[in-house]
Amino acid sequence: MSERIIHQPTSIIEKQYKRLLEQLEIFWGHPEQFDNAINRIMLDDRGDRAGFPIEVWAELNYLQLLHKSIYQRVSGPGHVRTGKNF
């Protein structure tokens, strides 16, 4: 008998901000583009946004730190560390 595994989102971003998550997924693995995308999300340059709940801020911060720890720039444009030590 095969069991079907159903993914249950535990992230508030996954549950309530799917469009935001899709934007971040597009640039995941591309340090400069990811930083630009997450900064656009986190910093209001229009002045008309209500802001995110603290849980969303915490998740965004975690994603930003995780991305930096995996895809840290090491020697200029186009060169990224993938987190693997070869």
Image (spheres, rainbow, N blue to C red):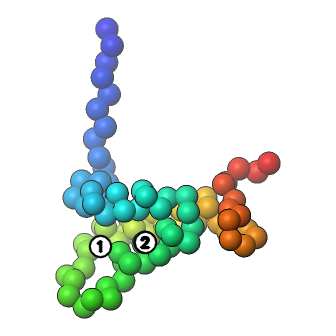
* Identity, as a three-letter code, of the amino acid under mark 1: Ile
**Residue placed at 43% from the left, 78% from the top?**
39
On the image, numbered disc 2 is attached to which residue? 37
Q: In the drawing, does residue 31 fall left or right of residue 75?
A: left
**Residue placed at 22% from the left, 83% from the top?**
49
- Residue occupying the far top of the picture: 1
Q: In the image, residue 68 lies at what x, y percent?
A: 58, 66
Quadrant in the rendering for residue 41: bottom left
> For the residue labelled by badge 1, is the local secondary structure a helix, a strand or a loop?
helix
Choose the circle earlier in sequence order: 1 or 2.
2
Q: In the image, residue 51 lies at what x, y percent?
A: 24, 79
**Residue placed at 27% from the left, 57% from the top?**
18
**Residue placed at 20% from the left, 87% from the top?**
48
Residue density around tag 1, few if under 14, some if 14–19, many if 20 or more, within 10 Å: few
54 over 44 or under it: above or below: above
Q: Which mark is residue 54?
A: 1
**Camera sees residue 50:** yes
**Camera sees residue 12:** no
* Identity, as a three-letter code, of the amino acid under mark 2: Ala
> For the residue labelled by badge 2, is the local secondary structure a helix, a strand or a loop?
helix
